[in-house]
Amino acid sequence: MDLCRLGQSDLRIAPLMLGGNVFGWNVDQATSSALLDAFIDAMISIAHEIETDPQMVKNAPYNTRTSRVDEVTAARKPVLRWKPA
């Protein structure tokens, strides 16, 4: 794995990391294990997609629904009541 430099320091870290500061504080051991398992499953799935169809990963996200892209409009005219699409 290629490591990248952390800021101006001599520390080298992986380019993709999972923040684990909540483990043991806000979630129990079972939930922590489930989160880590889900993260690993997602990374394995992404690695498989990269090997089989790299263009699909390059164009991702390819099925994300967005309804309010304009942040200014969202801030000035917030939708306070959710309606199913």
Image: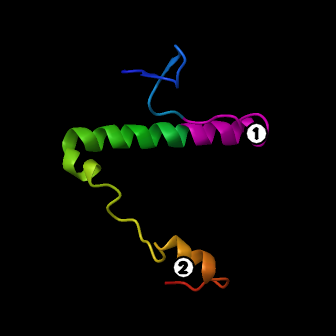
Image point (54%, 38%), residue name:
37
Instruction: Where is residue 52? Give x, y as percent.
Output: 20, 43
- The quadrant in which residue 19 appears is top right
Image point (58%, 86%), residue name:
83
Instruction: Please indicate, yes or no, whether residue 22 appears anywhere in the rendered image.
Output: yes
For discs 2 and 1, the disc positioned in front in the rendered view: 2
Instruction: Where is residue 17? Give x, y as percent.
Output: 51, 33
Is residue 4 magenta-colored? no
**79 sits left or right of 6 in the view:** right
* Residue at image mark 1: 28
What is the distance, in whole Å, between disc 2 and disc 1 at their CAs?
Answer: 39 Å
Is residue 24 magenta-colored? yes
For the N terminus, the quadrant is top left
Figure check: 48 above or below 71: above
Disc nearer the start of the sequence (2/1): 1
Quick one: SS at disc 2?
helix
Tell me the crowding category of disc 2: few under 14, some 14 to 19, or many 20 or more residues within 10 angstroms, Cα based.
Answer: few
Image point (26%, 41%), residue name:
50
Observer-nearest of 52 and 59: 59
Looking at the image, do the residues carrying marks 2 and 1 touch, with CB atoms under 8 Å apart?
no
Give the magenta range: 18-36
Observer-nearest of 5 and 37: 5
**6 sits left or right of 47 in the view:** right
**63 sits left or right of 54 in the view:** right
* Residue at image mark 2: 73
Instruction: Please indicate, yes or no, whether residue 78 appears anywhere in the rendered image.
Output: no
Of the residues shown, which amino acid type is indicated by label 1? Asp
Determine which of the numbered discs, if any, sits on residue 43 in the image: none
